[in-house]
Image: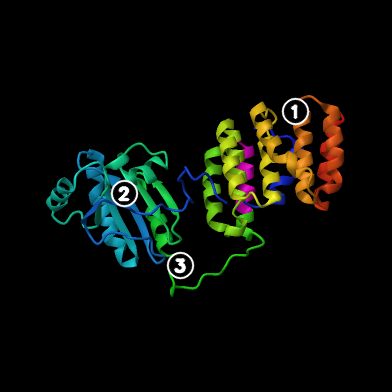
Amino acid sequence: MKLHVFRFVFLALVLITAARAAELKSGSEAPKVRVASWAQGEGVKEFEGDKVYIIEFWATWCGPCVAAIPHLNETYKKHKSKGLVVVGMNLGEDAATVAKFVKGMAGKMTYNVGVDEKTDGGWMAKHWLTAAGENGIPCAFVVNKKGRIAYIGHPMELKESLLESLLNEPSTKSGGTPQTAPSETAPSAKAGELASRAQSEIRAGKLDAAESTIGQLSEELPPALGYLCGLLELDLLLARKQPDDAIELSKLLGEDHGKNPAVLASIAAHLVAPEAASAALQAAAERIATPLAETSGDAQGSALSTLARIAFLKGDKARALELQTKAVPHVPKSETAAAKAVLESYGK
């Protein structure tokens, strides 16, 4: 996706978290485990910081699911002493059917087995499978020691090396290995590298790679700097030509960060960064930027630039020049040259 030089400021101004609540992907916080009953094992009440979890969705009538059970059981037996917990999450069947099947496995299925609730299509099915956009089983989710999703996919495709690396990570449980607290005011070097990589991948059209990188970034950012992922998610949706989803995400981000003018200004700027930003995207950005243009500081400069951008996209070059001229004195000094370059481009 070709982008105007207008994008100059907005990842530099702020750094942001959370992707859409309706989406579950690598890097997302794992939903809780809520079952109707446990057919086997003590079950899982909450994710503990010294363990790694595999939550695998299956059914007795599913041939590929049954075929994957021996492999999953061997994986569990091999790594349970290191802290691996496996849950076989049965979908759509009654407890008696599941219990009979587990008993018939005669020790070949030794991990926890849960039975999903049947109301509303199943709580686990809704909050895990549907939330992740998965519509088939078997499907496995891996939850790391931070309580975040580290893998979603077929259980037979889960790499041993990934499990081992997750199991070797320091514990985050109280009393475990102390964790170095991330900075609350600046991203780590690794986070900065991941953010830059995601931007580059989006520009190059490597959108699946960018999505994976954003997931990794979400694990590296402390809460105070979490919003970078949201901006990158906006760029990803726009690159995938999903403007309606981008607008919905901008609303969610606005709700989460409504007290941070710099974040709001950046959301507006990203909405109209594409060369062919639609009228709907322009309108969404204008609603955010207009009140900010009357404030002061960096948010004002960003908002004025966004309004100038919108005027330019509408073909009102004179208004774009007027607004961008006002913006230049209010952007951060490090961005002054870029703001002037945008101003010059509007005059051509």
> For the residue labelled by badge 1, is the local secondary structure a helix, a strand or a loop?
helix
Return the residue at label 2: 56
Residue 321, percent across and down? 86, 33
Q: Nearer the viewer, residue 264 or 106?
A: 264
Residue type at mark 2: give it.
Answer: Glu
Which residue is at the far top?
A: 315
Which mark is on residue 40?
none
Decide whether the magenta segment is chiefly helix, strand or loop: helix
Neighbor class of circle 2 (other Cα within 10 Å; few <14, some 14-19, many 20+) is: many
The magenta stretch is 193-205
Q: Is residue 201 magenta?
A: yes
Residue at coordinates 62% horizontally, 37% vertically from top-left? 204
Q: Which residue is mark 1?
A: 313
Q: Quadrant of the C terminus?
A: top right
Q: Which mark is residue 172?
A: 3
- The quadrant holding residue 135 is top left
Q: Earlier in the sequence, mark 2 or mark 3?
A: 2
Q: In the rendered structure, does residue 16 fall within the stretch colored magenta?
A: no
